[in-house]
Image: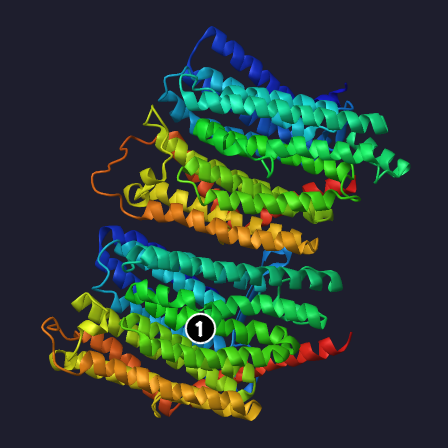
Amino acid sequence: MSGTDLTAILPFVVLGGTVTIVMLGIAFCRSHRLTALLSLLGLILCLIAIWPASDMAPRQVTPLFVIDRYALFYMGLIFASSIAVLLLAYGYLAARTEPPEEFYLLVLVATLGAVALVASNHFASFFLGLETLSISLLGLIAYPRDHGKPLEAGIKYLILAGISSAFLLFGMALIYARLGSMEFSRIAALLTVNDAPSDLYWLTGLALIFTGIGFKLSVVPFHMWAPDVYEGAPAPVAAFVAVVSKGAMFALLLRYFVTANADSFGPAPMMIEIVAIASILVGNLLALLQNNIKRILAYSSIAHLGYLLVAFLAGGALRIEAVTYYLVAYAVMTVGAFGIITVLSTSNAVAEIEDLDAYRGLIWRRPWLGGAFAAMLLSLAGIPLTMGFIGKFYAIAAGVSATMWPAVIALIVGSIVGLFYYLRVIVAICTPAPQGAAAYAGTVPRIGSATLVALTLMLFALGVYPTPLVHLIQVTAAQMTVR
Amino acid sequence: MILLWLILTPLVGGVIAGFSGRRNSALSRWLSLACLAIDLMLILALWATHYGAAVTLNGTWLAQIDWPWIPQLGIRLHLGLDGLSLLLILLTLGLGVMSVIASWSEITERVGFFHFNLLLTLAGVIGVFLALDLFLFFFFWELMLVPMYFLIAVWGHERRIYAAIKFFLFTQGSGLLMFAAIVALALINYRQTGTLTFDYFALAKTQLGPTTQMWLMLGFFMAFAVKLPVVPFHTWLADAHTEAPTAGSVILAGLLLKTGAYGLLRFAVPLFPAASATFAPVAMTLGVIGILYGAMLAFAQDDMKRLVAYTSISHLGFVVLGIYAGNALALQGAIVQMLAHGLSTGALFILVGALQERLHTRDMRQLSGLWSTAPRIGAVGLFFAIASLGLPGLGNFVGEFLVLFGTYRVASGFAIAGTLGLVVSTIYALSFVQRVFHGEPSARTVLADFSSRHMLVMATMIVALIWLGCYPQPVFDAASSALANLQRVASERQSHLGEP
């Protein structure tokens, strides 16, 4: 491993170092503030480390990892999301009874796993990253271990993670048995040589891998766990699962399909289209029935993954562009929406504020917080001025360019249904609270509020003037497709 | 640049008025009024400077700006003003001023937020009338929905939540169909030319097969038909108009419905002329059904606001008829009808809103003999009811008459059926006057008459309607250049379609 290689993987090195330092720091001195500071500092250094690394890109570092602009872009997204989650969690954790320090450690390790996923170019690193991510997530989900719901959610997630890993491993094994390689790019080459589109091993392997990934992405029909886990997990962790875990998985899926040429033949596009349509419809329809904000957001996240899969269907550069923009938008609005739940739940150490009724009149009691929540919801619904609108534009453009009309129609129908439950929440935060129901009057942590302000500003800025982001994404996508 | 100011003034003003409303609600009202007045000056100045030019330079734009917005996707900030946009923006700002004044005493809670939403809706509407980039057009199209939704949902009447959600779902859903059609059109153009663009003029040159053209046209038509509303898609209208606060109803009926008609005129017909011609008989049938059905429904209502809402369906049926009849006469008629409907219906909503504010009911069964207690309201009500039924000398008559005249040349059957609408409208308008203003005054109808503030609003609208009815030539002049524009786009389009 040369110096250039080390520079290329600098974000990994910094993150690994941060994990070690934070771990040792906790061992010597239990201090919430110190741990939080160290973790944030480490993550910010990771973000900075992307710059020297990008000078080396694209570079294959060992057969396992490839550091290209695509990987670095997603690393940036993941680091930024983790920073936002930690900032939101700071006040939240301070108000809880559990010792808060290990939370940071787990988030950092999970981030390491996610970062490994987006840079992996090999089944081994794929699996390694995935397990690192999943196991730390288990700890995070069940972090408030004195409560029933988080424990239940943790167990559910554990079982699911085990099953999906089994599917994945089996799929990988089948493809390896057929082609004798675990490198994505070699798989593509071997496939064309062997001319194997109709090969049973290959198809089964692909389907099993898609199933395993589908579980992690919580797309229909592998979605059952998501609402329970979102509901049970602490709100910042739910944001982390929704954004970092799913985002990294999606980035990997995209890289695998682009590099290994997985859907240029055979029934793969149809399979994805069906899953996309099912996710959109089921996610949106089930969200209608919920009264718990976290469950609504869980189902909405299922639907959004469906929209992402529609964006995934497009060909060429548009595909990477559409998916990447949508993922960034999704990250901002999801972290924002869960962030509001986190911030509001801070003062309530027993349970989180998650019932729809508790949000009644929020916009009149706390205009800024309520306004930010309304903005996040409108963005999720894809209304102009917000990032969600540009994202939806990309998804529709992708579906239309792939002439997948059923998917486009599902997207439109899904958006209408989706609008209905987002409006329900907005109606709730706009209608005055019933008399005597002074639900909560606690203080709102300042750091969390500042993070929310930043997220909301970003939501509008990149929704009104997305040019810089689009430019960045196009540069990223260009390198990926050229290779 | 002045076009951008037209949009920015209410936008920025809305934000300022929104904040100032937390401290001082009167300040918020005055600020909103000032913003709209400034905007009105701007557009009047534009009209005055270009008044002669608009006629002589047939088919040019009075003002345009074309800046890059998201260059990677070929999306530009392309705004253009021609006679049609000018007239509609004039109507927008006029009605905007009226609705701020009309809600002076009606809205007492959350005044700042109310004016913020009001001005934001107006900014969105102005944007719709100016946008020449299809992406930008859709952007504004959606943008005006959210503040309108809040107007209905927060300050509306009894069933406001239901009405607001229904309104939002109908318009947003149909809007997405149009969006898919816009994207499809842009991508087809991209495959043909290699440049991705959403520009109106560039997309007008796309070559389309007849089937594709028909599907894309239907995507656009759906969005505009829901907004207009054309009959099978009209169910949101009565609820939204009835439950909205007065200003909301005025803006909904006076402006938001017009955006649908404007969309048909500017986009659906010129971009897809052949498909529109094929589709015209269907659209005209729907228009005639709207005229008659809307009028009949209006007659059957006991709720005054619902009555006025249903008359909108009837009046806009004429607009549809005129647009799809397609000749210059009918199109001129449609434009005059749009303006006249905006004024007369807006005034009726203000009147009904004032009655509701005083009597706390909109039910005509509980009202009678208001004329004797409130003669000003009675006289104004009679005037606008008569305007609404199409009395010669008032704006609505010119519009309806020209539409029927133009339609007769193309499809006499539709014109004859449409004429029946005039009869039915007489029935509902007169029965409204009779039930509310005539008869024995009942006990609860002791009420304050119109204040001088209200009378000022009403007088302005009366003058405008009479002017439109007696001397519509300036409107014709302004519109004719715009219509020439549209016809040129359509005919260029036709020649492009001939090639493949």
Give the chain letter at badge 1: B
Residue B211, percent across and down?
69, 70
Toward the viewer: B312 or B375?
B312
Toward the viewer: B8 or A208?
A208
Residue A153, percent across and down?
49, 25
Residue B23, percent across and down?
23, 51
Q: Tell me, what colour scheme is on the image? A: rainbow
Which quadrant holds the C terminus of chain B? bottom right
| Location of residue B352 (image quadrant) | bottom left
Could you classify mark 1 by the number of other residues whose Cα lies within 10 Å: few (under 14), some (14-19), or many (20 or more)? many
Q: Residue B195 vs residue A81: left or right?
A: right
Q: Vertically, is B426 above or below A193?
A: below
Q: Which residue occupies 53% across, 83% down?
A: B481
Q: Amino acid at mark 1?
A: Lys
**Which residue has dot 1 on it?**
B258
Q: Which residue occupies 38% across, 32% down?
A: A343
Q: Which residue occupies 72% across, 71% down?
A: B209
* Number of marks in the rendered image: 1
